Amino acid sequence: MTYASRAVALVFGPPLRAIADWLAPGERVLLLTVGRQRRGVLEGRSRERTTWSRPGLRAFALTDRRLLGARRNGVRLELPLSAVRAARARRGALGSGVLELGLPQGALVVEGLPGADAETLAAALAQGSPGDSPTDLGSPTALHLHRGSLAGLAPVLLADLATLLLAPAALVIWFAALQGVRIGEVGDVGLVGALPLSAIVALLALTAGFALALARDRLGVAVVYVVVLVVALYGALVPIEEVSSFNVTWRHTGIAQYLAQVGTVDPDIDAYFNWPGFFAALALATKAAGVRDALAFAAWWPVAMNLLYLPPLAMIARSVGGDARLVPLTLWIFVLSNWVGQDYLSPQALHFGLFLVVLAVVLTWFGGSERGARPRVARRLRAAIASEPGAVARLPRGGRAAVLLVALAAALAIVPSHQLTPFSLLLVLVALVALRRTWLRGLPLILAVAIFAWLVFAAVSYLSGNIDELRAQFGQLEQTLASNVGERVGGSAGHALVVRARLLAAGLLWIAALAGAAHRLRSGRRTWSLVVLAAAPFGLPLVQPYGGEIVLRVYLFALPAMAALVASLALAAAGTRPLRSGSVVFALTLALLGSFLVTRYGNARIWLFSREEASVVDRVYDVAAPGSILVAPSTALPWQHRRYAELKHRNLSQLEAPPGGFGERALARAVLQVVDDKGEGADGYVITTRSTRAYDALFGRARWGSVVRLERALDASPSFLPIITRRDGRVWMAAPDRGRG
């Protein structure tokens, strides 16, 4: 037996034996062939489609009574000849045959058949009897494929392999193209202006490959494209950056390093130490990995986090049922729309993943109506606004307890690690319970008690120092929107374009999600769970502006549901015909991809640090005495990663300028006052870098002046002594006594 024969026997031997075992006494096998069954789809109201059969390779047997289709695990298709309403054969790729059947439960398509077998099957099934054309293959215990059975399947499998291999090939081209990009080439519109043509070609290849995989019903291949897209888009800065990017990453590294060195939490240092869970875990991971600091994890952290989001997001999409293509398309849209940049080395990145885990468990295994009797009014209200067909996944009692413990552990792990995520999760869970989308009434109660206990007992230092400010911000929606939206539209023309692109992208996605929700409601599909997930985070701006970022966080927490709703709308427009389906997905991807490159990496100019400026900052940490004060024009520089609590870090963002602005001497005196505004007499250092100058160019000069003017003022002032002068960074040491002399 040749290797090819052995491979055929290995793949199709079990299905053939399953068919032989399934045959009734006296039943004759008239034709035996192989092909690939596409996903069976039932079309309902408003063109909504529901998957009713799974795809895959099958051995098919036409008997004198029925059509059988078997996989390795047994017969999975049994069609009486009289059940086929219509049958048609047509030519497929590279001469293969395609059989299209009209069934009561929907259309069924088998591809990769030999052309002659497709014609024979179509003729037999169309007339409801096998006719005289097929030949009796003999004993049901001795079923064998005829010589040409695989002739139609080979082109289909080769096309699948080519589609699959296109993804890693595009990834290699993408990263090879990015190797030639330098941080100095990244301008005011971010990375998109520095991308070479080969990088654009790689992204177009990924777009075409995913659209083709989804159109040809290769959902496993489509998921591979999603994973490759995550690596490509969220690892885009890895070949470009000289050192770890994004200033907050360096700050979080410093907090973790402090906890690793000291081993205790001091909540009086700042707000981070009132929610230290993530940083304590990061300190342990740093020690366990044997690396110098957490910056070693920073480069690939966004990729790892977005890969972490995919499984629970897939469970959320699957929980609402319908077209099986909804899952990969939801993942694809989510990846292309998650431009808010909260997946760096941060508590938000990790705990957004835990947020998704909790919701995935709740909707998959604990969704649906609450157990027990309900008041009549509540029952009528629910029937009016939240009726959804379908059932949740079933688990034995022990399994349900296990997944509930997972959800509870994930929810409680969020509480000591992040200020905002617990409240977002609580809002969503309360809304799900209120609309009877889950019967886990105890879970939001437990979470609320945990949040209250943490605020009262563990975060009391933060609350006592900020209670007046928090009280003043509560419910100030107009002020919150102004700080989140109005104050961000400004700076250079390129930056203004990026901000407007973000507003437009978010607005259009919300509109599309609303249209998707309306479509699903008209179709009678499970919708209200997604509506709750998308709408509940809008309660967050009533609580606080969260440093001017709350609108971004609302978008992030609502994004999983919005992605599923937009995917539903896209599938309704795509239909089931491959050409139309592929075209719709390709066009949608191009729009989202172009938006992502601008909105995600629009601020990359100030995120990317040169090796020289990082070296300049490190030199200050090497020489500064304990208690020294470090001052920078803004926070856009690689600092706070060392000696976090030992040194004091200040910036000039809150420096108030007189109506006419500062002169150079007045500016130097104002900076000197920032260095020692409490008369502490500690050493002071002023640092400017390439990235702080870029911040000026991108966001516009500050109220007190520009970085270039600050450098001139410090050079001219006798109260500051220049100690480091390099192209990408300068440092002055405060010398007030020298100025007085």
Image (cartoon, rainbow, N blue to C red):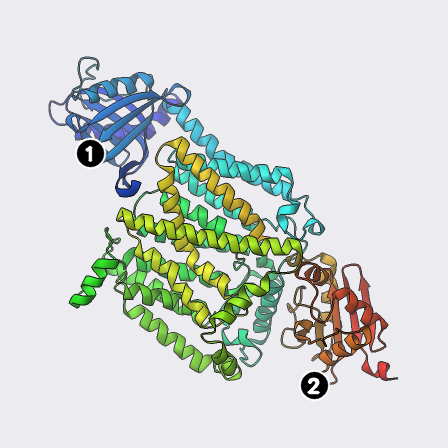
**Element carrying mark 1:** loop
Kind of residue sitting beneath label 1 = Pro
Percent from the top left, x then y, of residue 199? Answer: 60, 40
Percent from the top left, x then y, of residue 168? Answer: 52, 38
Q: CA distance from mark 1 to mark 2?
A: 82 Å
Kind of residue sitting beneath label 2 = Lys
Q: Residue at coordinates 51% horizontally, 72% vertically from top-left?
A: 276
**Element carrying mark 2:** loop
Q: Residue furthest top?
A: 132
The reply, left or right, for residue 342 in relation to residue 99 is right
**Label of residue 678 in the image:** 2
Q: Residue at coordinates 48% horizontally, 39% vertically from top-left?
A: 587
Percent from the top left, x then y, of residue 465? Answer: 53, 83
Residue 624: name its quadrant.
bottom right
Q: Residues within 10 Å of mark 1 (few under 14, many from 20)?
A: few
The reply, left or right, for residue 31 in relation to residue 710 is left
Q: Residue at coordinates 65% horizontally, 70% vertically from top-left?
A: 642
Task: Please report contact status of discs 1 and 2: CB closer than 8 Å, yes or no.
Answer: no
Which one is in front, 200 or 450?
200
**Label of residue 104 in the image:** 1
Percent from the top left, x then y, of residue 275? Answer: 49, 73
Residue 432: name its quadrant.
bottom left
Q: Residue at coordinates 61% horizontally, 67% vertically from top-left?
A: 251
Residue 259: name its quadrant.
bottom right
- The quarter of the picture where the C terminus appears is bottom right
Q: Residue furthest left?
A: 25
